[in-house]
Amino acid sequence: MKPIQIAIDGPSGAGKSTMAKLLSKRLGVMYLDTGAMYRAVALKAIRMGIDTRDREKVCEILPDLDIKIEYKDGNQQVLLDGEDVSGLIRTDEVSMGASNVSAIPEVRKKLVELQQKIASNNNVVMDGRDIGTHVLPNAQVKIFLTASSSERARRRYLELQEKGLLTKTFEELKQEIEQRDYNDSNRAASPLRQAEDAVLLDTSNLSIEESVDRIISIIKEKVGSDVL
Ligand code: DC
């Protein structure tokens, strides 16, 4: 049987990874967070003192780039040169760096190949920016998940506050989110776009539970209830 592929795209902070993780548990399929791969490239560049906007210099690290995805207790771990960097790639510095390196076509080519290889033999739910448009153009289910920038900043604010990591104001977080939206949507290489056959889901006024329920009904509609 053809592997089941579910693509979830959308801007930063729309809840893609929360949704994808819940779906992967509920459907028993593999979850691949593709943003983590761009983050790992950014971390490597930052560690080497390379400006993440410097295409030539970033390209120099690609031939030896060693990124692997492993699963421990059902959670994705990103290994960079054999080191688990899953926690280290979540800083604001790496977020902005990832947005920068993701605009470099050579970086995208390398990571998309890796993502397609992982998806080829597995049932997957993948989240990113170009999954429905480029990585898995034949995915049976494509969701474009979005929410207003204020709502996304509010969620990020609460998340940081809960973790005791709040160092920025709500306005600053909102501005950062809008800057990343702008970068991701306006780059030349695979900009953030809703695939023509993707279903748009705005979660600004939906709880996590309501959002998952909506996605489950979209999946049922597209591939039938026997997968659930
Ligand atoms: O989803 P995220 O915030 O972890 O992604 C980090 C950056 O990587 C984000 O700025 C956009 C980029 N990205 C991308 O261009 N394509 C993907 N498939 C996933 C992420």
Image: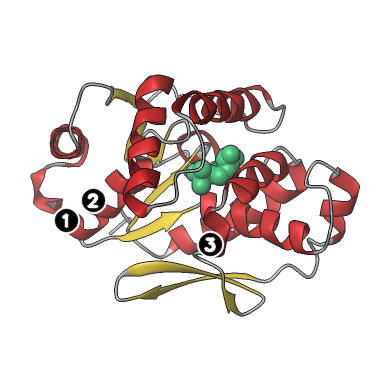
Query: Which is more foreground, mark 1 or mark 3?
Result: 1
Secondary structure at numbered mark 3: helix
Pick whichever, 10 or 154, lies toward us. Answer: 154
Colour scheme employed for the rendering of this structure: secondary structure
Q: Residue at x 43, y 22 (%)?
A: 149
Q: Are marks 1 and 2 in contact (CB under 8 Å)?
A: yes
Query: Going by the image, does 55 lie left or right of 145?
Result: right
The part of the image, by quadrant, that contains residue 202 is top left
According to the image, label 2 marks what residue? Answer: 23
Q: Which mark is residue 117?
A: 3
Judge left or right: residue 65 versus residue 85.
right
Q: Position of residue 146 (x, y in %)?
A: 37, 26
| Neighbours of disc 3 within 10 Å: few (<14), some (14-19), many (20+) | few
Query: What amino acid is found at the position of numbered circle 1 in the picture?
Result: Arg
Q: Quadrant of residue 138?
A: top left
Up/down of 179 relative to 116, above or below: above
The amino acid pointed to by label 2 is Leu
Look at mark 1 in the image and give the residue it sits on. Answer: 26
Considering depth in this image, is 174 or 86 the residue closer to the camera? 174
Location of the N terminus by quadrant is bottom left
Tag 3: residue type?
Lys
**N-terminal of the two: label 3 or label 2?**
2
Q: In the image, 81: left or right of 30?
A: right
Q: Quarter containing ligand 1?
A: top right
Position of residue 98 relative to residue 32, above or below, is: above
